[in-house]
Image (tube, rainbow, N blue to C red):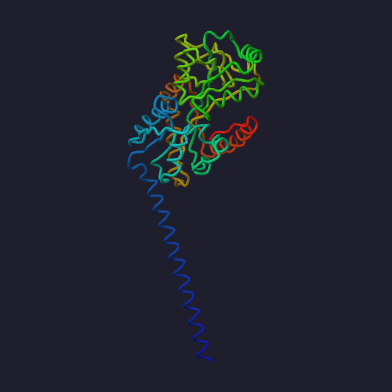
Amino acid sequence: MKSVDICSRVSVALSEAVRLMVVTAAAVVLAGAGMTAHAQAQSWPSRPVRIVVPFPPGGINDVLARVVAQKLSTQMGQSVVVDNRAGASGLVGSGLVAKSPADGYTLVCGSTTTVPVAPSLYKNLAFDPVHDLQPITRIAVVPSLVVVHPSVKVNSIRELIALARAQPGRLNYGSGGPGSIQHLATELFKLRAGIDLIHVPYKGGAPAMTDLVGGQLTLMFEAVPTALPNVRAGRTRAIAITSPRRMASLPDIPTVAESGLPGYELAIWLGILAPAGLPEEVLRRLNAELRRVIDDPEVRERFMSQGAEPVSDTVEAFSARITTEVTQWAEFVRQTDLKVE
């Protein structure tokens, strides 16, 4: 009995020792992993950071991303470069970032159309814009101008709606392609106004605007920065703006709501996102750095001169906004039966 008792005690002691060794080893591994993540965050950025713009050079996404990149480079003491990867209404570049390492060195300047809209509009996406990308912060809100060719005898949204009702299916509008903001803004307008307009899609907003100036199109809903030059030159006429209130820089242009369609408003956001799984400390650092950029008076002035309203969010607020907008846009797509292959 004594021999058995001694063996039992030895066995228990050995089991306890093994357990302690396992627990200790696990703690060391976890501590090491934590220290590694902390060290990575502390050293970030130790090499150039890339902001992918999923649209061609010259557009509002590109212009504002370059302003942010320039200021961020100076602020962090590390090169921040812009990389244009256009295609599929912004989904090529966004997908590239979604599949990149989640280390804080590859970001994307996303927008309303490439994140909350895309899951409902496109049925065969190679990635999930909502779950495969980590929101960091919005950087700007950009409304659109409703612009018509000077030969079109309307001076308000009310008159445009009346003309469309008098000539159903005869007025046309241009867009940068299916799923573009010009397309979505005009389809929302058609839905709310109960009118019929013919969609003429182009491979980008620039050729569509060229045809509007040339008189081949009746109207466009175009982002303020890219619409203004032709308005100021008299090549097109702005009859309304899609923001909820008039812009301080364009006080004479009424909103769509006050010009004839109450309740209509649409301003896309632009924001910075990263691959999902970004280390928490890098995520918080990026959010703080970007919000500091947006708060800079010079940056704000440059944004507003482009017709963009500078904004910023906490990570949580930006994520919550996207979640809400996914539902809203899904309902819009259902109501309009829009399909983009």
Q: Position of residue 218 (x, y in %)?
A: 54, 15
In the picture, residue 25 is in which quadrant? Answer: bottom left
Q: Position of residue 191 (x, y in %)?
A: 64, 24
Task: Specify whether 190 is left or right of 136.
Answer: right
Q: Nearer the viewer, residue 323 or 164?
A: 164
Q: Position of residue 183 (x, y in %)?
A: 54, 25
Residue 303 in the image: above or below residue 122? above
Q: Residue furthest front?
A: 170
Residue 16 in the image: above or below residue 278? below
Q: How many numbered tags mark residues here?
A: 0
Q: Nearer the viewer, residue 110 or 302?
A: 110
The N terminus, quarter of image = bottom right
Residue 183 in the image: above or below residue 259? below
In the picture, residue 303 is in which quadrant? Answer: top left
Task: Specify whether 102 is left or right of 269.
Answer: left
Residue 173 in the image: above or below residue 6? above
Task: Specify whether 62 is left or right of 269.
Answer: left
Q: Position of residue 273 (x, y in %)?
A: 47, 38
Residue displayed at 44% across by 10% down: 233
Task: Specify whether 163 is left or right of 297.
Answer: right
Q: Nearer the viewer, residue 58 or 282?
A: 58
